[in-house]
Image: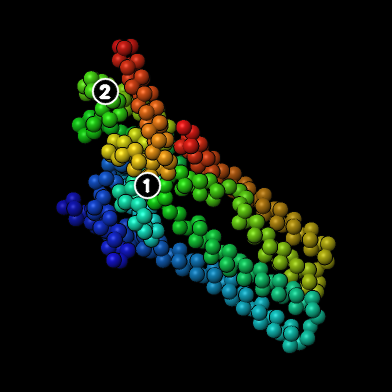
Amino acid sequence: MKTNNTLGNLQQLIHRLKNEDSKYARLSKSFQILYFILTFLFGVLIIIHIIEKEPLSELAGATCFLLSMLSYAFFFRKYYKDYNNVDYSQPTLMMLKKAAYRYQPFQRQTAWLIIPLLLIDAGLALNSSLGFDFIKLQLIWFGTLAFAVCIGLTIWYFRYKPLHDNAKQLIREIENV
Amino acid sequence: MKKEEQFNKLVADNDERIKRICNYYNANKTDQQDMYQEILVNIWKSLDNFRGDSSINTWIYRIAINTSLNYTGKAYRHLKVMVDADQYNLSSILDDQSLEMKLLEEKQLEQLQNELNTLSVIDKALISLMLEGLTMKEIGDVIGITESNVKVKIHRIKSQLKQKMEDNYENE
């Protein structure tokens, strides 16, 4: 009876895990598809700009948008892989070091995200049809980014800093002989 | 072999081992079951990365210990190492058979339990692997440190525990 129960629970668990796997896979795919659709749309926009012989700045602006969407599509793919495939079968010290890196507020790989952000800014500035004032645009854009960073850091402080500190402390403990 | 079949086989082969690890860390049945489930979830998640570079035992222990550390983050205050005089060879902790005999008295076993629970999370992990009968090299492979580092750490934990137990015994 007990064995049957255990087997039943295990089958339930497998079912749940498989659902979880496919849910993440679907979510990841949806985001990638969204970014690739946006990339395609900007590609079409570039072709229209070329056909209609619009000013070079418009073409450059659309290209900046296209490149930023493309970058996000690839970044998202990599981030998804890194964050959702935590391998618990690594040696403890290695796993903790990776966790400490993952939970730090600024990472080297995050710096690459600045490039698509600058590309969007360039796209907005170059696209004269949008009619943004350059200085005002920079103030609003970088102001919004600074605000987003502040919110991100607050979330990090309360949600991820304890995990980061805990991992760091365990690393010190293991390495301290 | 399909992932599901591989998972079923792994769990069936290592069920007792995983349950023992859970028992070391939780006195409470519900907590043991929660941790057991969490270990199974992590086995499933890590299964795609298993390439046979390490032995299956080391692989399972790594997942169990890493899960227990993660579990620590969630329920740090409740985490306790539980040892049972009937099941485990206590002399492996204390290197002292006469002290082990004294420990068989319930009160002293309780004292050992208390002393074990004053250890740091990593020291608890090392002790639980030692109680599982892993060699120093295997423990090193699980934790990710050298065999000599494991020896130094375990020697220090044992001396610490032995000293405390002797002090307690003399004070009574």
Q: Quadrant of residue B136?
A: top left
- Location of mark 1 (residue): B62
Q: In the rendered view of the protein, which quadrant contains the N terminus of chain B?
A: bottom left
- Foreground residue, A89 or A148? A89
Quarter-of-image position of residue B163: top left
Q: Are marks 2 and 1 in contact (CB under 8 Å)?
A: no
User: In the picture provided, is B69 more to the left or to the right than A153?
Assistant: left
- Identify the mark at residue B122; answer none if there is no mark: none
Chain of the residue under label 1: B
Residue A129 appears in the rendering: no
Q: Is residue A4 left or right of residue B93?
A: left
The residue pinned by badge 2 equals B96
Give above or below for B86 relative to A68: above
The answer to whether residue A34 is above or below residue A49 is above
In the rendered view of the protein, which quadrant contains the C terminus of chain B? top left
Image location (x, y in percent) of residue A61: 74, 73
